[in-house]
Amino acid sequence: MTRVHRIVMLGAPGAGKGTQAVRLAEHFQIPTISTGELFRQHIRTGTELGELAATYIDGGNLVPDDITIRMVKERLSRTDVEGGFILDGFPRTVVQAEALGEMLGEEDITAVVELWVDAEEVIPRLLNRAATEARSDDTAEVIRQRIKVYREQTRPLHEYYIKEGTLREINAVGEIEQITERILAELER
Ligand code: ADP
């Protein structure tokens, strides 16, 4: 019997969620759902949702829960997630976590992978990405705001998923490959 993996990635901006999500998706042959990517797609194609989302994203703030939840719900209703999925960047608030629980119903999240890095490590990583990817939300000021938002709104999910019993903490300092190995080992336990 193959196990269905329904995985949530947690961690500060720049912790490497996106990088590891893609690697895990490849390993398990399941799709990655990145809310940041979904929003950026909307922005690129000029949808109404994209226009609205951009005003929040460019300031380093979260897109309102109702909009984000609706977008994820739509994505999770497609058939390609039936064999499992990796969520990258969702949930980011307790309200979103509760909504995800409702969306999944009987199908529990199999693991919440929380990547841990030092704050000193994260800021240079993000600035470096800003230089290479030209993301409009990777300027020093916006990065600071995103970290603040993470501390205030997303960090409570640590406690939330400890209570749910699904949290797996991973030391995310090191080589990309090595961190993937740590996650896979943790998921096999
Ligand atoms: P990072 O992981 O580096 O912070 P993302 O690509 O995941 O970047 O997200 C970029 C931006 O998209 C966030 O700063 C936020 O404005 C918006 N966003 C992404 N996911 C969510 C979410 N679940 N809820 C609200 N806003 C979100």
Image (tube, grey):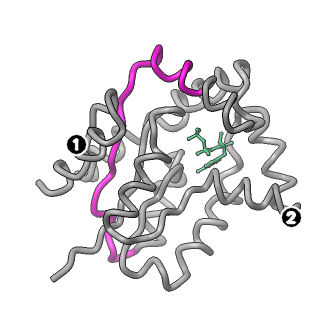
The answer as to whether callout 2 falls within 8 Å of ligand 1 is: no
Residue at position x 51%, y 27% in the image: 151
Contact? badges 2 and 1 (CB < 8 Å): no
Query: Which quarter of the figure has residue 117?
Result: top left
Which residue sits furthest left?
189
| Label drawn at residue 147 | none
* Between marks 2 and 1 in the image, the one whose residue lies nearer the viewer: 1
Residue at position x 50%, y 38% in the image: 154
User: Height in image: 24 above or below 163?
Assistant: below
Looking at the rendered image, the quarter that the N terminus falls into is: bottom left
Question: Along the polypeptide, which appears first: circle 2 or circle 1?
Answer: 2
Q: Magenta stretch: residue 116 in it?
A: yes
State the SS at label 1.
helix
Looking at the rendered image, the quarter that the C terminus falls into is: bottom left
State the SS at label 2.
loop
Q: Magenta stretch: residue 1 in it?
A: no
Q: Amino acid at mark 2?
A: Thr
Q: Amino acid at mark 1?
A: Arg
Residue 71 rendering spot, x and y as whole percentages? 66, 66
Q: Which residue is mark 1?
A: 182
Alpha-carbon distance for marks 2 and 1?
39 Å
Front residue of 124 and 88: 124
Q: Which residues are magenta?
A: 105-126
Q: Which residue is mark 2?
A: 47
Instruction: Please give left or right for residue 86 compared with residue 106 in the image.
Output: right
> How many other residues sit within 10 Å of disc 2, few (<14), some (14-19) or many (≥20)?
few
Ligand 1 quadrant in view: top right
User: Height in image: 162 above or below 104?
Assistant: above
Residue at position x 28%, y 74% in the image: 4
Residue 62 rendering spot, x and y as whole percentages? 67, 42
Residue 185 rendering spot, x and y as whole percentages? 16, 50
